[in-house]
Each structure stands twice: as structure tokens, then as C-alpha cells.
Image (cartoon, helix red, strand yellow):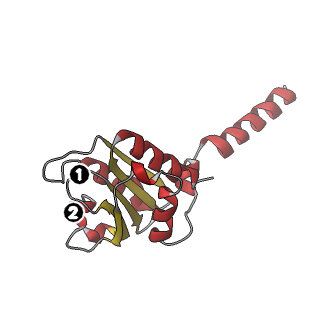
Amino acid sequence: MKKISLILCVVLSFALLTGCGKTANSEKMLDGSLEEIMNKVYEGIPEDSLPMVGNQPITEEMSEYNVGVTADRYKEAQSGDAMIGSIPHSVVLVRAKSMDDVAELKADIEKNANPRKWVCVEAEKVIVDSIGDVIILIMSDAATADAIDANFKALAK
């Protein structure tokens, strides 16, 4: 009976340590500025797969257009958008005010992101993902969006 109790304690302890809590991506915090993180998510993607991209901080006035939420909801945001308006490509990084805000902010960005924000074109794929307090919104063609998302996920390692 003591062996069964001991085994049960060990199993329950292991389950508590590994099964409860946040996922690895939500616990990992990304170092560096949003501009540095943006450069990392574009690394290794062939230039002929990307439009000419301009990276810049997102202003309060442009927040709802680029992020889908007002600027008071997050700490800072950076965008990497196609410099030619007829090419549907946008990558947005948002740093939440706290880890407690990430899940709700991520859901609101996903809900409000507009893949038709360009006049005559629409992004083929929309991805919203997060690592720690950084949320990424990717709107682009499917292959480019997947490559950028893979680079972002690799930052969690």
C-alpha cells in the first residue's frame, strides 16, 4: 500500500510540475527591441519572396488600422509593411503591457485584423501568434506568412 501511495505522489507531483501552468511559448520572454525582433523574423527569407518592406513604430493614430486595437491596450508596436500599397503584406509586433494582457489582446487582434486593409487586394493568410509578451500579426501570401511565423516560433527556443 505504501508503494502505491508513493508512486501516486510521484505521478501527481510530476503532473503538477509539467501539466499545469502556461505553455513554453507564453513563458519565454523575447529579448531586444521590437525592431530587432522584426529583423529576426525576416532573416533567411529570400528577397524575391518579399516586397520592399518599411519597418516603423506604430503611432497611436495608426494603431487600429495596423493592429486592430487602440494604442492604449499595449506597451508598444512595430510594423513591417509593403511600401507599395497594392501588395498585401504586413507584419506587426505588439508588446503587451503585461503577461496578463496577452491572451485577450491576442484574441482581439485576431478578431479585428483586416486582411483587406489595402485598397484592391487581400492577404492570402492571417496568422496571430505570441511568445511571452510579444504578439505577432502576419498578413501576407501563405508561403511568406508561414516562413515568417516559423522564424518567430524559432525565437522561443
Q: Quadrant of the N terminus?
A: top right
Residue at screen point 44% across, 54% down: 47
Where residue 82 sits in the image (x, y, percent)?
Answer: 30, 59
**Callout 1 amino acid:** Asn
Is residue 75 in sight in this rendering? no
Q: Please state which of residues 80 and 67 is positioned toward the viewer in this rendering.
A: 80
Residue at screen point 23% across, 51% down: 112
Q: Residue furthest left?
A: 119
Callout 1 crowding tier (Cα within 10 Å): few <14, some 14–19, many ≥20:
some
Where residue 154 sits in the image (x, y, percent)?
Answer: 57, 51
Check disc 1 and report its element: helix, strand or loop: helix
For label 2, the residue is 64
Callout 2 crowding tier (Cα within 10 Å): few <14, some 14–19, many ≥20:
some
Residue 154 against residue 15 in the figure, above or below: below
Where residue 125 sits in the image (x, y, percent)?
Answer: 32, 41
Check disc 2 and report its element: helix, strand or loop: helix
User: What mark, if any, has residue 144 been given in the picture?
Assistant: none
For label 1, the residue is 112
Q: Please state which of residues 40 and 97 is positioned toward the viewer in this rendering.
A: 40
Where residue 24 sits in the image (x, y, percent)?
Answer: 59, 49
